[in-house]
Each structure stands twice: as C-alpha cells, then as structure tokens.
Amino acid sequence: MFDRKRLSMLNRRSFAMLSAGTAAAALLPSRSHSQGQPPPPAAPVPGAIEALIVNRSEPVLCAEKDNVDIRMSHPALRSFRIQAIHPAYIGGLVADNFAADWTNCDFTADPAFKPPAPPRRVTIYEDEWLWVIGYSYPAFWRPADVPVRIGNRVEQGLHLIQVWVRRNERSEEVAVVYPPDGYWRIRPLPPQHLKWSAYGSSFVAGPIEDKGRPIVEFKEVVFDPATMTFTTPFRRGGQAVLKISTLDRDRLTMDVSFDRPIPDLPFCSLRSMYVTEFNNDAARVAIRQKNAQRWIEEPLMDFKQAQGVEFWAGRHSYSRHNTSAPDMVFDRFSTVG
C-alpha cells in the first residue's frame, strides 16, 4: 500500500530545518506594471488551439484514492501551460487540515514492488538557494527503474524527487515528481499569513497509457538547476520539457513542450480526489472556449467533456481535505513547441 500525498508530507517535515537565505532572482515575481494598475493584456498564443477535455472520473468513498481523471488531447499539440494557483478563499483560511483520511479505504489489492536497497534519502543537487532531494521507499506500486540525472550525477532506484527553494528567509518545497509512473505535484509559495500550504491535485504530462492507472513512462528524468527545467524522454519515443517559469506567493507556472505531437493518446491528465463537496482536492471545473463570452462552470463529477482553450479545476468552498491545496489551470494549448 502506498499514499503519495502522505509520503510527500512526511518528507517535507524531515527537511524543515534547512537554513534560510536569498531566493534566485530568475524566479522573482514580475514588477513590470505600476502599483494599483492592471497588468498588460496577455500576449496572443502562437498556434492556439482548443484541446478536447474528457472526464473519466469514477465515484469513490476513500479520500486517499485519486478517482478524478480528466484527460486532455489534441493530435497536433506541441505545448501548453500548467499553473497551481492558491484558491480564492486562501486569504480567509486561518488553519489547514492535511491529515490523511483512511475511512472506507482498502488498498490490499494494489501491486507493490520492493526495491533491492533499503529506504534512503539522497541530496542530488544543492546550492545556496535550491535543493533537489531523492527518496526511495520500502514499497511502491511500480518498480523504480528510471534513472535521474543532474549534470554528471546519475541516481538510480528513486521513487520520488523533491524540489526545494530558499525564499523569504525559509525553505519551501514547491514541486515533486514520481519517476516510476510520471506523476507531478506543484504548488506556489505559501501565502504570507500561513506557515505552509498543502499539495493537492497531481498531473501526468506525455503519452498517457492505462496500466492499472493512467501513467506516463519515462526513460529518464533530467533536471537543469540553472533554468529550473526538467526533460523527460519517453519510453514510447519523444520527450517533454517542463520549465518552472513563475514562482511566487500566488502561483507556480510550469511551461510544457513536446518535441513532437502525441496524436493517438491524451497528452495530459489531471488526477485528483473527490468524495463529497466537503471532502475533496477539487470539486468544480470551468472551461473557457474559443471566442466564448462566458465560461462553462460545472460540479466536477457532473462534467462530461468539452473543447476549450483554458481549463480550471478547484474549489469554491473549504474542504476538510488539504484545505489550502491549490487550484489547477491548464491553458495556452498550442501547435507551436
């Protein structure tokens, strides 16, 4: 049995004593417009397209199972953007709830692969403002056979990679990736009035296959600390480049590009959890269609499918589960890589 949310939470606590310092200037929030003035309009997207967004979610009673599966596809897509943005109610949140809820959960049928080596934690990269930490665990649902490379250093047998940054005189974990199944979680820096904020929904980006769960199979994971860029060659051929381009107290933005289209499979899936309106990681969806004058808005489990240039999944009201977890936005779908 394994729960990626709980594993990430425990690892975050174990790393909480990192010393403070100054953040990288390359990821500082933009100050390009004057205080109190609206930002300039967004630049048009070259090769803009609508993606087909299909809901394949299934109802469950267990709050620790990712039953939400919303897939995006387009035969000519080469790039898009993913954003993790604090929920609209974050300013009114004074306490968080991130404890695991195992009510009505049974994972006894899940596969588990035991690594040949004992559990370990390894620092793969470290400088004055950035750390990349790898973990292996006693068991995971897929074998840990994807190498992780930073510069000339290669690590084998890792189930989880964490990206930590030093910001605002403290250390913050902002992204994780699971090399064995291609899952990602991202989050912004916590708002100023909270000590930290939770992870919530996850995503997979690349040629999605169903192998017990929707997964993307990597050949390896390569990280460039200087540009905050991941490169993930796929076992099916081709590769993705995922770059953290914005990181502040409001959002984390990740720009995704493929070296070739993925015509026969979905290129991305949002994975999340929904049990009830008060127990979920995402409860609502909204889709903006090309040239439309309003958004389509629906409860997550009622949504079926739509074409859209922008897709949002999140919450309007507090949940008992990962209350501070970010909303997720997918947009800037394009045929230009």
Image (cartoon, helix red, strand yellow):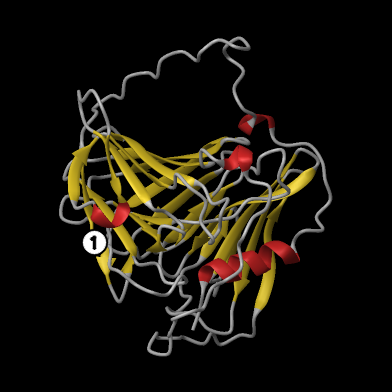
User: Percent from the top left, x then y, of residue 18?
Assistant: 80, 55
Label 1: few (<14), some (14–19) or many (≥20) C-alpha neighbours in 10 Å? some
* Residue at 20% from the left image edge and 23% from the top image edge: 291
Answer left or right for 107 relative to 268.
right
User: Percent from the top left, x then y, of residue 5?
Assistant: 54, 66
Residue in front for this viewpoint, 36 or 185: 36
**Could you tell me if residue 274 is visible in this image?**
no
Answer left or right for 80 relative to 250.
left
Amino acid of disc 1: Arg
- The picture quadrant where one finds residue 217 is bottom left
Q: Secondary structure at mark 1?
A: loop
The total number of labels drawn is 1
- Is residue 288 positioned above or below 67 on the image? above
User: Percent from the top left, x then y, of residue 29?
Assistant: 61, 27
Residue corresponding to mark 1: 56
* Residue at 20% from the left image edge and 25% from the top image edge: 292
Residue in front for this viewpoint, 90 or 136: 90
Quadrant where the C terminus is found in the figure = top left
Residue in front for this viewpoint, 331 or 19: 331
- The picture quadrant where one finds residue 143 is bottom left
Residue in front for this viewpoint, 321 or 192: 321
* Residue at 50% from the left image edge and 15% from the top image edge: 39
- Is residue 153 positioned above or below 130 on the image? below
**Could you tell me if residue 46 is visible in this image?**
yes
User: Percent from the top left, x then y, of residue 92?
Assistant: 62, 40
Residue at the far bottom: name it. 108
